[in-house]
Image: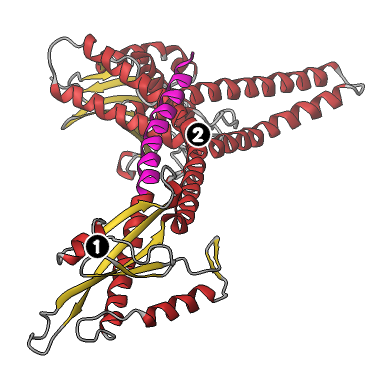
């Protein structure tokens, strides 16, 4: 199983366990919460009936005649109440009244009148002045027949007793079948489980996205572990900087996962635009070659086709290099690189090209500086800046490679004596495919070299700038590559 699949199923399993625990807790808690709400309503109803009965007490005797006619009329009422998904059509509230000895004086259902209820918890506790309540089954063994009962005391105040010190002469109990609000519990459970199912489906999609995002960050963690093992000695500052680079890389990976579609679309659109011109030139030359013409003219068209084909090939190659570089959010391997020997090596390697163009290259450095870098990428970056300077240098011009130290930064400069950068192009030089015509050939490059340098600088936690030299120093452009110095 691939790493991505393991991450996907791992995240899904963790979420499923968590969601199952939450749903179980919520669903199992629905019935008690509904019972508590129903109990609170029944308590108020029992107190209301007790107050009504107390108005008919004469000389300590309870009169239930009013209750009898009241409940008969209530049970006979016809109505329809749509309570969300439940349609209620009858009164299911029941009540009974007992005297001070627990004998039933009135039962709204007509089934228990005259029976002794003194041992029932609701009656027993209420006659003692305590809160009495119970839940009992109408049909033994059938939990769906459960009925909740709440009682309230019936008091009688004689002329010799003060206000609020009435004697308890009986109890009134109201009951409600649990099944009546069980419909609401069942509906709530269904809605909760439905919401949980929708959540699981949504997380399936999220898990796919997150698993793709996390594959690369897990690889970055492994890279960090290898980096630590490769270190000689303990360097907290260096390790913290590396860890910060890894976290930033993981964030960039997740951001790019969201923006990837637009990123690819922009790349394709730009590449299509840039390839259109050389393809048109190739097509035009190929069509003309089908016509009779002189050999010199034919060779010129063939040369044009070869040149434009080479241009497309260079563009594709550089684009692939740049794309591969942009997908890297952190350098896989770094090592100490001395910059002065690197500049000397590049100046020597470019000596032949400079001589052909009538230019000279010099290296100016106050001291050597060491940075942590990928030697190959760093050499490519400085080489691109040097090639760019040579392309714009006039015959007899001078290209200077400079190295300076400013605080914790090493500064590599590449100066030329060319025409400089026009004002309209200064904000575009690092854009992909943007290029200025070379003074010698009047041709443009692929426009990817400086973008390549910018990506390399970013990977090394540095930056690159390109601008014109001050007027007092003459014409020309100056590229500056900033790199953090290696911690001692």
Mark identifier at residue 123: 1
Where residue 157 sits in the image (x, y, percent)? Answer: 15, 84
- Residue 346 shown in magenta: no
Where residue 291 sits in the image (x, y, percent)? Answer: 91, 24
Which secondary structure lies at badge 2? helix
Q: Which residues are magenta?
A: 1-29
**Disc nearer the start of the sequence (2/1):** 1
Q: Quadrant of residue 474?
A: top left
Where residue 414 sits in the image (x, y, percent)? Answer: 35, 28
- Residue 25 shown in magenta: yes
3D distance between C-alphas at marks 2 and 1: 55 Å
> Label 1: few (<14), some or many (≥20) within 10 Å?
many
Specify the farthest residue to the bottom. 159
For the point 41% across and 55% down, which residue is it? 178
For the point 39% across and 34% down, which residue is it? 252
Q: Which residue is mark 2?
A: 204
Residue 474: in sight, yes or no?
Answer: yes
In the image, 467 versus 57, the foreground residue is: 57
Which secondary structure lies at badge 1? helix
Where residue 135 sits in the image (x, y, percent)? Answer: 33, 53
Q: Is residue 443 left or right of residue 58?
A: right
Q: What coloring was used for the rendering?
A: secondary structure
**Residue 430 in the image: above or below residue 39:** above
């Amino acid at each position: 199983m691939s790493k991505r699949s393991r991450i996907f199923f791992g995240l899904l399993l963790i979420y499923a366990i968590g969601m199952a625990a939450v749903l179980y807790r919520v669903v199992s808690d629905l019935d008690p919460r509904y019972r508590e709400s129903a109990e609170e309503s029944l308590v108020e109803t029992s107190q209301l009936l007790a107050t009504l009965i107390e108005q008919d007490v004469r000389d300590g005797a309870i009169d239930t005649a009013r209750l009898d006619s009241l409940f008969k009329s209530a049970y006979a009422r016809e109505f329809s109440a749509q309570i969300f998904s439940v349609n209620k059509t009858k009164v299911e509230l029941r009540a009974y009244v007992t005297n001070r000895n627990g004998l039933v004086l009135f039962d709204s259902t007509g089934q228990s009148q005259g029976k002794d209820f003194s041992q029932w918890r609701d009656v027993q506790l209420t006659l003692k002045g305590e809160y009495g309540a119970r839940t009992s089954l109408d049909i033994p063994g059938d939990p769906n027949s459960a009925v909740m009962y709440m009682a309230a005391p019936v008091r009688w105040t004689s002329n010799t007793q003060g206000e609020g010190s009435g004697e308890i002469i009986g109890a009134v109990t109201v009951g409600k079948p649990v099944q009546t609000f069980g419909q609401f519990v069942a509906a709530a459970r269904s809605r909760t489980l439905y919401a949980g199912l929708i959540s699981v489906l949504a997380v399936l999609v999220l898990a796919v996205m997150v698993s793709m995002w996390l594959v690369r960050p897990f690889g970055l963690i492994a890279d960090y572990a290898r980096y630590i093992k490769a270190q000689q000695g303990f360097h907290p500052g260096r390790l913290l900087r590396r860890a910060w680079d890894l976290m930033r890389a993981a964030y960039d990976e997740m951001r790019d996962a969201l923006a990837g579609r637009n990123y690819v679309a922009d790349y394709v659109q730009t590449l299509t635009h840039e390839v259109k011109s050389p393809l048109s030139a190739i097509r035009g030359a190929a069509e003309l070659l089908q016509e009779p013409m002189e050999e010199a003219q034919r060779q010129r068209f063939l040369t044009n086709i070869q040149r434009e084909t080479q241009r497309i090939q260079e563009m594709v190659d550089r684009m692939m290099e740049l794309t591969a570089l942009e997908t890297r959010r952190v350098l896989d391997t770094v090592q100490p690189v001395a910059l002065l020997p690197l500049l000397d090596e590049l100046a020597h390697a470019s000596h032949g090209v400079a001589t052909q163009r009538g230019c000279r290259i010099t290296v100016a450095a106050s001291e050597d500086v060491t940075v942590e870098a990928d030697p190959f990428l760093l050499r490519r970056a400085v080489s691109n800046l040097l090639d760019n300077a040579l392309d714009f240098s006039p015959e007899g011009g001078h290209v200077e490679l400079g190295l300076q130290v400013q605080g914790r930064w090493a500064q590599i400069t590449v100066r030329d004596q060319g025409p400089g950068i026009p004002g309209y192009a200064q904000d575009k030089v690092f854009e992909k495919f943007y290029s200025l015509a070379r003074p010698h050939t009047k041709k443009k490059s692929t426009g990817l070299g400086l973008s390549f340098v910018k990506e390399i600088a970013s990977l090394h936690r540095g930056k690159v700038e390109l601008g014109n030299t001050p007027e007092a120093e003459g014409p020309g452009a100056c590229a500056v590559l900033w790199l953090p110095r290696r911690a001692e």
